[in-house]
């Protein structure tokens, strides 16, 4: 559990810098309670440049794949704005499972970058957080369709 907490903290520190690099959508998967040799982190980002980045990390071994996509950025940004109006609900789930996080990013009227929570299944805390917006679910499905596993 400590390993997962440390990885989650490192992930949160990297989100600010990567989001400013043009990330529209992301999914991050951290394994649950597991042996170090099985601790694989999976990240997938959809960038506003029309690229998708898949990254896998196991210990110090990292692979990255960049895939070109044709996107309707205006439609995605509109869906993100609508998802930002959703209400986040939570419920208890089993602990020691994986943590899967879906986020979208937008620039607010004040020029500040804002993360929009779409969904999180947090095996470390035993909580599931879900955005009840129709568009949040559409964006999650879009992420899954493009990112695969």
Image (cartoon, rainbow, N blue to C red):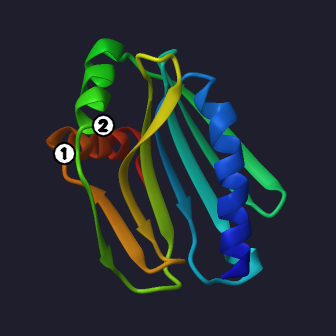
Please provide percent x and percent y for residue 121: 40, 67
Residue at the location (64% across, 37% down)?
A: 16
Image height of 109 relative to 84, above or below: above
Crowding at label 2, few (<14), some or many (≥20) Cα neighbours within 10 Å? many
Mark 1 = which residue?
A: 133
Image height of 98 relative to 134, above or below: below
Q: Is residue 21 left or right of residue 47?
A: right
- Residue 87 or residue 42, whichever sits in front: 87
Residue at the location (64% across, 51% down)?
A: 12
Crowding at label 1, few (<14), some or many (≥20) Cα neighbours within 10 Å? some
CA distance separating discs 2 and 1: 8 Å
Please provide percent x and percent y for residue 46: 47, 31
Residue at the location (41% across, 16% down)?
A: 109
Residue at the location (31% across, 30% down)?
A: 80
Classify the position of the C terminus by image quarter.
Answer: bottom left
- Tag 2 and tag 1, C-beta contact below 8 Å: yes
Q: Is residue 37 left or right of residue 115?
A: right
Q: Is residue 67 left or right of residue 65?
A: left
| Rendered image quadrant of residue 30 | bottom right
Name the residue at the left extreme. Answer: 134
Name the residue at the front extreme. Answer: 110
- Residue 114 or residue 53, whichever sits in front: 114
- Residue 11 or residue 81, whichever sits in front: 81
Query: Which SS class for mark 1?
Result: loop
Disc 2 or 1, which lies upstream in sequence?
Answer: 2
Please provide percent x and percent y for residue 57: 71, 56
Residue 84 badge? 2
């Amino acid at each position: 559990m400590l390993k997962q907490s440390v990885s989650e903290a490192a992930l949160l520190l990297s989100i600010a810098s990567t989001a400013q690099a043009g990330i529209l959508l992301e999914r991050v998967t951290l394994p649950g309670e597991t042996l170090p040799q099985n601790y694989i982190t999976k990240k997938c980002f959809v960038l506003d440049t029309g690229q998708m980045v898949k990254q896998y990390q196991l210990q110090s071994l990292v692979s990255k794949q960049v895939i070109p996509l044709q996107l309707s950025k205006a439609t995605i940004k509109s869906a993100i704005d609508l998802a930002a109006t959703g209400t986040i609900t939570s419920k208890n789930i089993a602990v020691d499972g994986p943590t899967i996080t879906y986020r979208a990013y937008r620039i607010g009227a004040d020029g500040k970058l804002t993360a929009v929570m779409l969904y999180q299944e947090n095996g470390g805390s035993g909580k599931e957080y879900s955005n009840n917006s129709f568009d949040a679910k559409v964006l999650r499905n879009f992420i899954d369709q493009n990112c695969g596993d």
